[in-house]
Image: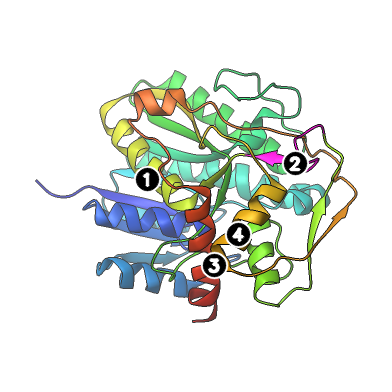
C-alpha cells in the first residue's frame, strides 16, 4: 500500500518543523507549503538532515488561491495539517486586518482548494487563547469560547468555519488541536524556536538572556494570586505537541466529523519556576526584572488533557527539565548554524 501524503502548511515554523520530523519518521510522504514570512527555509533542510528523508516544498501564500489549486492539482494529498498563520498577540492588536486576512481568509482558501481536490481530512492548529479570560482551570474542550484579542478571534473563527463545514458534509474529518505553551526544541539541537527581534514567547527570551544576547528577562506581573506571584502556564515540550499532531492525523483517518482536543501537560508552572528550572538545566544564571502586568494576561491557566489521553492515545512525556535542556541545546547549536 502506498504511504499517505500529508500537506503541512507552515511546515518551516517552530511547531510545523517538529511535526514534519514526526510525520517523516512515521513513514508519511510530505509536501510542505510556507511563504517564509516568519520562518527560514534552512529549518526544512535540517528536518531532512534529522530524518534522512526528502519532501516537496512549495514557497506559496495561503492568500494565493491559484497557487493552492495548482498545488492540489499537481500532487495527490490525502490530508492536511494546517499550521500557517500569524501568531503574535500584540501585533494582532495593532494590525487586525492583516491577521484576519492571513488566518481566516487563508484558511477559507485552503479549505476551498481541498474541497475541489476531494481532500477532506484536516488537523487544525488552534490555541488555548480561544478560551478567553473567564473560564476556570483546568480548561475543558466544551467550555465556551471567548477570545479577547484579534489573534485569538481568528482561531475561534477558523474553528467555527471548520465545525460548520463538518456539519454540512459528512465526508469531512476535522481535528482541532488547542495547545497551550510549547517550549523546548528537538533533542538534536538542529531545530527549535528562532524568532526575529525581541521574542514574544518566554523560552527564546530566557535563552537569549542565558547566552548574553539580552541583558535580563522581563517578567510581566509579580503580584498575581499564585504561589510566587508570577503567572502560571501549562508549558509543554514542542516534540510532545508534534506527536499530538501525529496522533490527531491518525484519528482523522479513522473518524469523520469534527472534534477539539487540548494538548498540554495538565500541570501549571509559574514563570519563576520555569526560570529556576532553566538555570538548573543550563548552569547559567538568568537575571530578571519584574515589571507591571500586561493587559489581558491571566494569573493562571492549564489544560485538562483527559480527552486527548482517551481518544488520541496521546499524553505529554517530557519533563520541565527536559524542555529547558533541549531549548538550551538549540540556543548553543542550532540557533547559530
- Identify the residue at horizontal 46%, vertical 55% (top origin): 16
* Residue 168 seen in the current view: yes
Give the labeled residue for mark 3. 328
Q: Nearer the viewer, mark 2 or mark 1?
A: 2
Image quadrant in which you'd find residue 70: bottom left
**Element type at mark 2:** loop
Give the distance between the C-alpha atoms of the residues marked 2 and 3, in whole angstroms. 22 Å
Task: Using a 10 Å C-alpha cutoff, classify the residue at mark 1 as few (fewer than 14 neighbours), some (14 to 19) or many (20 or more).
Answer: many
Residue named by callout 1: 243
Q: Which of the 4 image quarters holds residue 206?
A: bottom right
Quadrant (top left/top right/bottom left/bottom right) for the N terminus? top left
Q: Which residues are magenta?
A: 225-233
Left/right of residue 91 with respect to residue 183 in the rendered view: right
Decide if residue 135 is on the left or right side of residue 20.
right
Residue 35: where, in percent of width, then height? 53, 64
Does the segment drawn in magenta span residue 266?
no
Q: Earlier in the sequence, mark 3 or mark 1?
A: 1
Mark 2 surroundings within 10 Å by alpha-carbon count, few (fewer than 14), some (14 through 19), many (20 or more): many
Secondary element type, mark 1: helix
> Nearest the camera: 80 or 196?
196
Asked whether the residues under the numbered discs 4 and 3 touch, taking CB atoms below 8 Å apart as contact, a structural biologist would say yes
Mark number, residue 231? 2
Check disc 4 and report the residue beneath it.
278
Residue 232 counted in the magenta span: yes
- As helix, strand or loop, the secondary structure at mark 4 comes to helix
Q: Do callouts 2 and 3 mark residues in contact (Cβ within 8 Å)?
A: no
- Sequence-wise, which precedes: disc 2 or disc 1? 2
200 sits left or right of 108 in the view: right
Amino acid at each position: 500500500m502506498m504511504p499517505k501524503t500529508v500537506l503541512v502548511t507552515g511546515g518551516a515554523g517552530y511547531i510545523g518543523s517538529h511535526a514534519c520530523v514526526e510525520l517523516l519518521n512515521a513513514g508519511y510522504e510530505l509536501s510542505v507549503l510556507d511563504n517564509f514570512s516568519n520562518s527560514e527555509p534552512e529549518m526544512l533542510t535540517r528536518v531532512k538532515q534529522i530524518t534522512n528523508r526528502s519532501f516537496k516544498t512549495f514557497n506559496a501564500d495561503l492568500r494565493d488561491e491559484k497557487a493552492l489549486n495548482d498545488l492540489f492539482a499537481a500532487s495527490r494529498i490525502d490530508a492536511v495539517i494546517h499550521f500557517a498563520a500569524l501568531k503574535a498577540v500584540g501585533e494582532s492588536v495593532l494590525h487586525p486586518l492583516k491577521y484576519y486576512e492571513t488566518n481566516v481568509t487563508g484558511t477559507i482558501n485552503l479549505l476551498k482548494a481541498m474541497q475541489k481536490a476531494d481532500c477532506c481530512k484536516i488537523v487544525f492548529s488552534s490555541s488555548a487563547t480561544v478560551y478567553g479570560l473567564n473560564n476556570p482551570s483546568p480548561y475543558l474542550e466544551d467550555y465556551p469560547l471567548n477570545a479577547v484579542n484579534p489573534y485569538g478571534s481568528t482561531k475561534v473563527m477558523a474553528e467555527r468555519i471548520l465545525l460548520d463545514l463538518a456539519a454540512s458534509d459528512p465526508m469531512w474529518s476535522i481535528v482541532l488541536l488547542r495547545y497551550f505553551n510549547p517550549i523546548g526544541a528537538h533533542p538534536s539541537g538542529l531545530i527549535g524556536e528562532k524568532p526575529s527581534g525581541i521574542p514574544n514567547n518566554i523560552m527564546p527570551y530566557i535563552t537569549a538572556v542565558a547566552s548574553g544576547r539580552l541583558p535580563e528577562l522581563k517578567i510581566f506581573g509579580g503580584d498575581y494570586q499564585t504561589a510566587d506571584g508570577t503567572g502560571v502556564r501549562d508549558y509543554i515540550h514542542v516534540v510532545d505537541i508534534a506527536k499530538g499532531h501525529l496522533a490527531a492525523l491518525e484519528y482523522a483517518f479513522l473518524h469523520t466529523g469534527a472534534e477539539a482536543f487540548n494538548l498540554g501537560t495538565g500541570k501549571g508552572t509559574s514563570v519563576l519556576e520555569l526560570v529556576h528550572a532553566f538555570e538548573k538545566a543550563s548552569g547559567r544564571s538568568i537575571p530578571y526584572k519584574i515589571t507591571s502586568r500586561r493587559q489581558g494576561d491571566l494569573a493562571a491557566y492549564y489544560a485538562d488533557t483527559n480527552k486527548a489521553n482517551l481518544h488520541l492515545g496521546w499524553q505529554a512525556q517530557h519533563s520541565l527539565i527536559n524542555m529547558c535542556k533541549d531549548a538550551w541545546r538549540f540556543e548553543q547549536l542550532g540557533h547559530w548554524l
